Amino acid sequence: MRNRQATYSQRSFLLRIYVASIVVIIIYLALSPLLKPDTTRLILLAMLGCALVGGYAYTSQSRHYTRSSHYYTVCCYATIISNALLNGGIGAPGTIWFLLCPLIAFITLSTRVARIWLIIILATVLLLFIFKKQVGSIEYKNLDAWYFTSYMLFFPMVYSIMRIFRREVSKKNVALNVLNQRLKVEREMLQHTQQEILCQSARIKEEENKAQARSLKLSFYLNQLIEVKRMEEVHSGNLEYAIQAVLQFLQKSMMLKNVALWHAEGHGQPLERLRHIGNDGSNASEPAFLYREQFVEAYEMLQTGAIINQCDNTREAAQLKTLFKHAQGNDSMINCPYFLEGKFAGFISCRASDRLWVAEDIIFVRAISDTISLAFKSHHRIVQQQMLEQKQREITEMNELLERKVKTRTQELNLRNKQLTDFSFTNAHHIRGPLCRLLGLKNLLSATTDCREVLKIADYMTASITELDNTTRETSKKLNALVEDKENFENQNLLQSGE
């Protein structure tokens, strides 16, 4: 038999049964002067009382009631069977107390154990009936009184057991009712919790759907950004063409009513509308300007890099609503700044009908504004590259011109050097030779007195003088030509320098 933890009501029931049984034994012993039992019956009753007192003590200390219940039934059975064997067999008074064993087993243990005790009792009665000659030869004194006392004590004992059982069951029912109330409250709380869980589940499902929609939207915008980054127009350097393409792409991707680009050429300059794209593809070409004095707070907010969402109830958004005259109707706008070299250069204005701008839209517009900055940088890079190429061509032309000048001057200097060399050679040989001869002839003339030699020397001197005169004339012509070429060369250099 499996032991079970005793509850308070079961232990209390066993303790009350022990007390009731002890009271019955005390009554038996108290009536012994009237019933005049033999010594054996008194000894059995006393032993049963002692055993029940021990069982009571064990039950009050033990946590297991099954052992106490088995102990009680075994003690009762042993006492009753001993009484039957020693005092008349099946006809002995008190045999009816056999029914107490299956009754207690049924109440405290289980139906199966009660059935086992019923079988044991039936077998015991059957054996007592079969062997009644061997155990039934003893005659009782005051037999009627003993039967009357046994029945009068047995039925109150059964009634007491029923009352005790009903009282314990009532306590159990009260406890069960309290438990049922608690269970009812907990069930209601559980139902409420379940409703909350269902609501939370519905909200989580809704949030999952929103998150999935946002994920799809982000994926779409990411693909659009990849596509716009690959656009050839953005990197072509043609600013007007690039702005037109990017704004059309933005208007188509976000299904906007219109989109405009406002740009300032420098710090303190008014914002000019460079491009305006409508949902029908129209492109407004009329000039429009915005001045800082018209929206000071919104302008300062844009300078910080913040996006102005006209769905927000802010003073800056109200300024732009009033400025763009979109306060009426269901139109909503979002304005995203862009920067060039770290400085505020303008903003993109997107307009849609009856739309709440979410974070994905703001991220996408900000990425497009970065693309606009990239288009401006590409344009400036192309312009700078063209300027550098122009400067390079000018430098190349200047280098070629300088090379030609150097070559010409080198040729002229070589010519001048050659002329100077010829002049030096003429001065050293053609002029110096006749002078030296004249000096020698002069010395010879001073040293002779012979008329024929004098005439001969005079002829030589005349020839040298004639040669010197011819050389001097030719040298003078060469010198004049050299001076004239030098003046022409200097005038030409002055003209080239002036150019």
Image: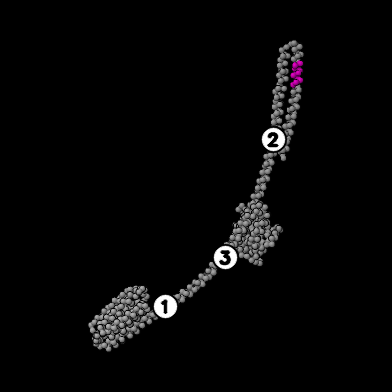
Residue 121: percent from left, percent from top: 32, 81
Amino acid type at image mark 3? Lys
Image side of residue 171 versus residue 311, left or right: left
- 123, 338: nearer the viewer: 123
Residue, far left:
39
Residue at 68 percent across and 35 percent down: it is 406
Image quadrant where residue 155 sits: bottom left
Question: On residue 407, which mark appears?
Answer: 2
* Label disc, if present, on residue 240 of the rendered structure: none
Asked if the stretch drawn in magenta spans residue 276, the answer is no
- Crowding near the residue tagged with mark 2, few <14, some 14–19, many ≥20 C-alpha atoms within 10 Å: few
Residue at the spot of label 1: 176
Instruction: Specify start and end residues of the magenta stretch as a single range.
Output: 459-468
User: What residue do we see at 30% from left, 78% from top?
Assistant: 74
Marks 3 and 1, the one that precedes in the sequence: 1
Give percent across and percent down for residue 230: 63, 54
Say whether residue 129 is visible: yes
Relative to 490, say whether 358 is above or below. below
Marks 3/1: CA–CA distance? 48 Å
Q: Is residue 379 above or below residue 171?
A: above
First along the sequence among labels 2 and 1: 1
Give the residue at x 70% y 35%: 408
Quadrant containing the N terminus in the rendered view: bottom left
In the image, what residue type sits under mark 2?
Lys
Hey, what amino acid is under mark 1?
A: Leu
From the image, tell me which residue sits under label 3: 210
State the residue in front, 126 or 388.
126
